[in-house]
Amino acid sequence: MDLTSYAELAVLLVNRRDDLKTLDGLRDLLSETGRTEAAGRATRRDLDHVIELRDELTEVFESAAEGNEEDVVQRLNGLLVRHPVHPQIAGHDGQPWHMHLTEGGRVGDTVAVGSVMGLASVVTGLGADRLGICQAAPCRNAYLDTSSNRSRRYCSERCASRANVAAYRARKRGPKASDGQ
């Protein structure tokens, strides 16, 4: 069972701080990630649950970015206890039988279980250093590093380009400042 798409949901939750303030924002996120049935059932209570979860997931990514692997694991274990997994076999959209996590019940629970299990799978399979916070100032978006050499430092190509241009400009200014110009 590949839980990467669930881990990517966790990244989206953390990165959509501004979009997840309204029920429509939650419904849009769910629809965009192929969870249209859940989007139709989402309630204000689910939104409140997802906002709380987003804050907790942000702390997981921040701990990972600080290199605090034990805190990452402790936080994920706490979330796993609060959001137990209930796998289900599913078949839809012409796909073969496959596993889903908590497709029934409240939408907020479904989002929580999937996000937490996805991150737990990444941490146990690849390491906590695969979770990070973008190093391009002022961006604070989360990312999953799925590169083969563990080299990702930015949430997107846009942030990587912006940081590289800023570093280049700083290098170009450096010698002039020391010359007294």
Image (spheres, helix red, strand yellow):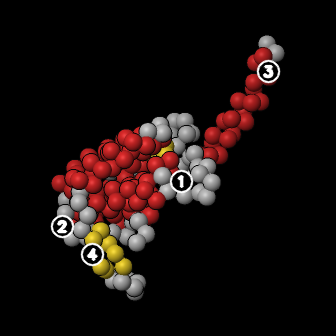
Mark 3 lies on residue: 176
Q: Which residue is mark 1?
A: 145
Give the quarter of the image for residue 170. top right
Residue on which the image places disc 2: 105
Which amino acid type is marked by label 1? Asp
Numbered disc 4: secondary structure: strand
- Residues marked 2 and 3 touching at CB (< 8 Å): no
Q: Quadrant of the N terminus?
A: bottom left
The answer to whether the residue labelled 2 contacts the one labelled 4, judged by CB atoms less than 8 Å apart, is: no
| Residue 12: quarter of image | bottom left
Which residue occupies 55% across, 36% down? 137
The residue at the point 50 percent across, 47 percent down is 129
Q: Which residue is mark 4?
A: 88
Identify the secondary structure beneath mark 3: helix
Give the amino acid type for the residue marked by disc 2 in the picture.
Gly
Few, some or many residues within 10 Å of mark 2 (<14, 14–19, 20+): few
Q: Is residue 12 left or right of residue 177?
A: left
Secondary structure under tag 1 reads: loop
Q: In what quadrant of the picture does the C terminus appear?
A: top right
Vertical placement of 111 versus 168: above or below?
A: below
What residue sits 77% from the left and 30% below the top?
172
Callout 3 amino acid: Lys
Q: Nearer the viewer, residue 32 or 126?
A: 126
For label 1, the crowd category at 10 Å Cα-Cα, with few meaning under 14, some 14 to 19 and many 20 or more, is many
